[in-house]
Amino acid sequence: ADQTRGPLETKKAALRLPLAPLGAPARTASAVRWGGLEPPRLAAHGPQPCLSANSSTSADERAKRYYSRAHRRVNQSALRDALESEVTRIVLDAMGSDQHPAPEIDAARAAVDRWNDAVILSGPRARLEPLLVPDGAGERITIADAPEVIQMADKGATAARGKAENSMAVGMELLRQGQADAFVTAGNTGGAMTTALLRLGRMRGVRRPALAPMFPVAGGRAVVLDIGANVDCKPEFLVQFAVMGSVYAQVVLGVPSPRVGLLTNGEEAGKGNELIHETYPLLESSGLNFIGSVEPKEIYAGKADVAVTDGFTGNVFLKTSESVARFLVDTLREEITAGPITAAGGLLARPAFRRVARILDPAEYGAAPLLGVNGLVFVGHGRSDGRALVNAIAVARQAAEAGLLDALRRALEPFLSREPSDS
């Protein structure tokens, strides 16, 4: 080893990605092989260990015990026709949103009408079945019985482990077995994260999964990650977030070589905390289309397709953006209706205001993918209504049909040869 290199140079050398910019031909035989969108359907996900690597107990035996109770609840005979069809199969957590299960049932009906796909509602059969009887939706909407629910007030990690038959666990079990193509929930984010790790496991080489929502920006949309799955991060995590976010932008936004920015408090390379200082040179040498540091104003100006940050900063950015958007819309409404002249002008401008409100409405963007787990898991806002959940299903369908999982696995190949020293 070169004794003249400092700690930062050593870390850069260990993490350097032999990547061509995503969307461009690989430079070397070891470079990421990215061939664009792949329309073939996803292969069934094989069983994944749900235990930590340092467990001394047989992973197969403990996994079998963990899965068995929830698996018995799935009515295989009722699901058979839908699961064997050629349509995209979506599992929707019927007990996720604040107003469950009404928004989920509305979304399932709308999705069946719109795409004629199979929608599987995971939740208590005794509660859901009477609500579907007058619907006449037929075999396209089925129920996977899940008698337990992770509530918003629950501690996600504890509830996910203590309620083995909850609606998220039963839904993700179908995904794990390859009997569904994607899972959508508007429930407890921590519960969804823990359940995904227990049921599906992380992709090989992934240090931490990340939530990656779309944000409306000038000229289109941008991916921002992480927005809450990982409060504390290391530079290596952010590099992987950038890789996964770039692939997601390619698959969903159709951007050949996404511009990646590092979210911080200034455009200059020297700005930011220690995490930013250590991450910046790693992204520079990553082979991604890294454009440097970006402030929130650069994101909203459309200068980056992917913005990378730790989960704490990302969550503050998300909630601040939602609050400012709501404040602006409410203030405009109040000022326009304050007098007869402005009210008359408001009538003329109403179509434009409606378009702006629609762009700023979180319901338009449905749900955010949890990138880095062995399955397509999408997490929406607890306040999601039926329209928001239909949009969440639309995003999940797009990701499944475009082969997002396969694209992520190819992009993460360079990380497989570098086992992390710690977690």
Image (cartoon, grey):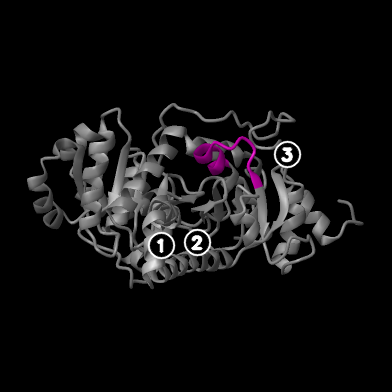
Residue tagged 1: 189
Percent x, y of residue 252: 50, 40
Structural crowding at the residue carrying mark 1, measured as other residues with C-alpha within 10 Å and reported as few (<14), some (14–19) or many (≥20)? many
Q: Is residue 135 magenta?
A: no
Mark 3 belongs to which amino acid?
Pro
Mark 3 sits on what residue?
Answer: 18
Residue located beneath label 2 in the image: 229
What residue span does the magenta drawing correspond to? 247-259
Instruction: Give the residue type at disc 2.
Output: Ala
Q: CA distance from mark 3 to mark 2?
A: 27 Å
SS at badge 3: loop
Residue 92 at what x, y percent from top left?
A: 29, 49
Inter-mark Cα distance, 2 to 1: 8 Å
**What is the distance, in whole Å, between disc 1 and disc 3 at their CAs?**
34 Å
Q: Mark 1, mark 3: which one is toward the viewer?
A: 1
Q: Please, is residue 281 above or below residue 137 in the view?
A: below
Sequence-wise, which precedes: disc 2 or disc 1? 1
Q: Are marks 2 and 1 in contact (CB under 8 Å)?
A: yes
The residue sitting at 74% across, 30% down in the picture is 28
Query: Helix or strand or loop: what does disc 1 sit on?
Result: helix
